[in-house]
Amino acid sequence: MRADLGETLVTREAIARRVEAMGRALASDLEGSMRASGDDPSGGNVVLIPVLTGALVFTADLIRELPLKLSLRVVAVSSYPGKSMASKGVKMASELPGDLRGRHVVVVDDILDSGQTLGLLRDLIVEQEPASVRIVVLLRKPESARKRAVPVEYVGFDIPDAFVVGYGLDYDGFYRNHPEIATLRPDAIG
């Protein structure tokens, strides 16, 4: 596997530090929002929605940094099928949770690239009238990669417009288990 990888963009140590800091900031902001809206922060009115499968590893680490009572509801969205390195358009592969009204919703995704996936999810969630919606991404590509503007409240790292793998991100289903964010060597792409 390592022979297929190119440049390491983000080390596992940097990821760990940043995820811890993002968790602290998110927990503090959620508690403040809940108090402002009259919700009890210990009442379990927070719903985290990880976007599968890429955000699985990131979400597992992030929730360990959130000392809040919360529920986890996953959603599957497909935009990079198989060996594709460019988005083929957003396709919902599972239902969005239908009980988000009045809840504090946090969407967790691995990367903000074209903005199509997160834009669609935000629109569908807002239709349910949640108390608040926040988006958390581990990685954000430059604005020039965006096809749709999407407000993102928490960003782990800004990266160049390159195809990356590791820490949950894949190419053709592989490399999710690599603990760092890296590019692929051109000869590994088939």
Image (cartoon, helix red, strand yellow):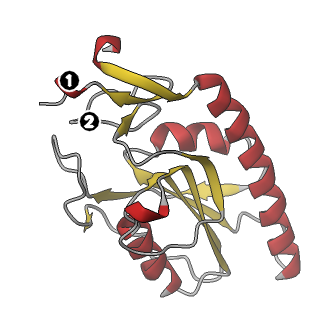
| Mark 1, residue position | 188
Task: Pick whichever of labels 1 and 2 is earlier in the sequence.
Answer: 2
**The C terminus sits in image quarter:** top left
Q: Position of residue 179 (x, y in %)?
A: 50, 23
Q: Position of residue 145 (x, y in %)?
A: 39, 61
Q: Label 2 crowding class (10 Å Cα cut-off): few <14, some 14-19, many 20+?
A: many
Which quarter of the picture shows residue 170? Answer: top left
For the point 65% across and 65% down, which residue is it?
A: 153
Do residues under tags 1 and 2 come within 8 Å of each other at their CB atoms?
A: yes
The residue closer to the viewer here, 127 or 12, is: 12
For the point 42% across and 36% down, which residue is it?
A: 168
For the point 40% across and 49% down, which residue is it?
A: 161
Q: Secondary structure at mark 2?
A: loop
**The N terminus sits in image quarter:** top left
Q: Is residue 135 left or right of residue 144?
A: right
Residue 189 visible within the image: yes
On screen, residue 103 above or below 84: below
Identify the mark at residue 171; answer none if there is no mark: 2
Q: Position of residue 173 (x, y in %)?
A: 25, 34
Q: Is residue 59 left or right of residue 46?
A: left
Identify the mark at residue 13; answer none if there is no mark: none
The residue closer to the viewer here, 181 or 20, is: 181
